[in-house]
Image: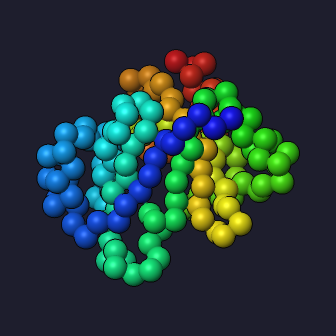
Amino acid sequence: MIKGLYEAHLPVRNLKTAEAFYTKLGLELAWRDDETLFYWLEKGKSWLGLWEGKEVDTPYHPSLRHIAFRVSYSSLAEAEQWLGSIGVKAVPFGGRTSVAPFIRPYQGNGSIYFKDPDGNSLELMCTVEVPEQLKEVTEKFSIMEWEAHLREI
């Protein structure tokens, strides 16, 4: 199921300062929003997420307690069942109520979340080929919804 590391995260005090530094290191910017930068470590396979926030110096910051494992799209589609078979419950992400795997067209990836025994946030994540007409869509789709959209194109 797990093929490698998809992403790791670090908290930063200032995104502009972090962007200058990581760009100077030669990393390619993959995606950004107002509070987050993602740089490719291995293009299409793994990235580093940088999260701006005041909690950088505190013992807990969400970015310090989360990693994502790289899986294939077909493994992601079966991930909820696989997790259940090994006694691990999937958990919702953000404001979602569903625990099922979902697709983020605007980032070109899909995920399912779960926790380890210490409450660390873990994720199974894959890259997804996104047709040009869906690249700006910020809605998250279940895999079934995503595949229906692809059939309509």
The foreground one among 110 and 49 is 49
**Residue 92 horizontal/vertical position (percent):** 65, 58
Above or below: residue 65 compared with residue 150: below
Taking the spot 17% from the left edge, 54% from the top edge, the residue there is: 21
Side (left or right) of 2 relative to 85? left
Side (left or right) of 123 relative to 85? left
Q: Is residue 54 visible?
A: yes
Taking the spot 46% from the left edge, 47% from the top edge, the residue there is: 7
The foreground one among 25 and 44 is 25
> In the figure, residue 56 lies in which quadrant?
bottom left
Above or below: residue 85 compared with residue 122: above
**Residue 98 horizontal/vertical position (percent):** 69, 53
Taking the spot 71% from the left edge, 66% from the top edge, the residue there is: 117
> In the figure, residue 50 lies in which quadrant?
bottom left
Query: How are the colours assigned in the image?
Result: rainbow
Quadrant of image for the N terminus: top right
Above or below: residue 72 compared with residue 65: above
Q: How many marks?
A: 0
Side (left or right) of 6 relative to 141? left
> In the figure, residue 151 lies in which quadrant?
top right
**Residue 33 horizontal/vertical position (percent):** 31, 53
Taking the spot 21% from the left edge, 50% from the top edge, the residue there is: 22
Q: Is residue 104 visible?
A: no
**Residue 133 horizontal/vertical position (percent):** 40, 25
